[in-house]
Image: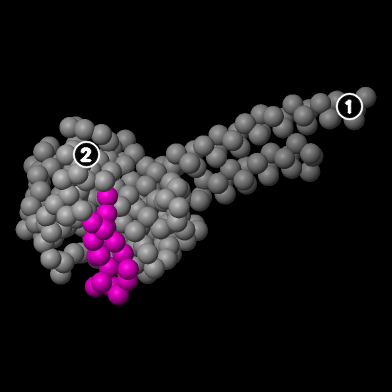
Amino acid sequence: MSAFSRIFLGLCISCFALYAQADLIITDPVAGVTVLDFESEPTLTSVSGPVQIGTPAGLDITFSGSPNTGLYITTSWGLVDNGSWSGIKFLGANDARPGSMIIAFNDGPVATVGGFINHGPNRGPDLIISALDQSMVVLETYNITNDAPIITPGEINGGGFRGISRVNTDIYYFEVYGEFPVMDYLTFSDIAAVDSTAPVPSLSVAFRLLLVLILLLVALPLVYRRKQLINR
């Protein structure tokens, strides 16, 4: 195998490995997951948080965010063009439009996390989900409005599962940000889940792929020059 072939193959493998670090998932994973549905939680309105929500699973999981009008565990929420949620318990956050919900896994990190989510579209910022490490540094982030939009016009309790899965078990926080977002069925696992129906690279993975391509462009002229020197 030539030097060029070895370098090109190595860069391709690196590129694939970087791409495979994380995945946006849009179907509810079923293997080895824990699900919290909040039905046993007391109704809370306009609380500051953090709120303990992991007790039913025997875990320390808290719910916080950046709402100046409060965090909610409630049964009624209007979602404008996407209908409304009512008659079920769910999480909501409102920073006088938009809001941010942050789930903290205080007992240790997970590899996969997501939930059944909806928001008020077309009235504010895009719906974005993010996975963060122990220092609250963003590991992966996805623009759901662009990558996997949730469209439920006029529906009651409509929405879609959206989440993030990583090869490494290093997710300490999961954030949902958008125009008064809501979430039910918080789902998480220390097992990575790969959803082939959503092959959308995250921003951080895309950045790493760009670096690999840059390295490839730099390496090609060097290899070509080396071959010229050898053939002289």
Does the rendering let one see residue 102? yes
The stretch in magenta equals 49-65
Q: Mark 1 points at which residue?
A: 229
Which disc is residue 98 wearing? 2
**Along the viewing direction, whichever of 67 and 212 lies nearer the viewer:** 67
Judged from the image, the secondary structure of the residue bearing numbered disc 1 is helix
Query: Within the magenta stretch, is there residue 64?
Result: yes
Q: Which residue is drawn at 24% across and 65% down?
A: 53
Q: Whole-percent x and y of residue 35?
A: 27, 66
Q: Residue at x 13, y 59 (%)?
A: 44
Residue with the most extreme bottom position: 58
- The Cα atoms of the two marked residues, 1 and 2, are separated by 61 Å
Q: What residue type is labelled 1?
A: Leu
Q: Residue at x 27, y 36 (%)?
A: 126
Return the disc, 1 or 2, that comes first in the chain's sequence. 2
In the picture provided, is 44 more to the left or to the right than 202? left
In the picture provided, is 193 more to the left or to the right than 125? right
Q: Whole-percent x and y of residue 203?
A: 45, 39
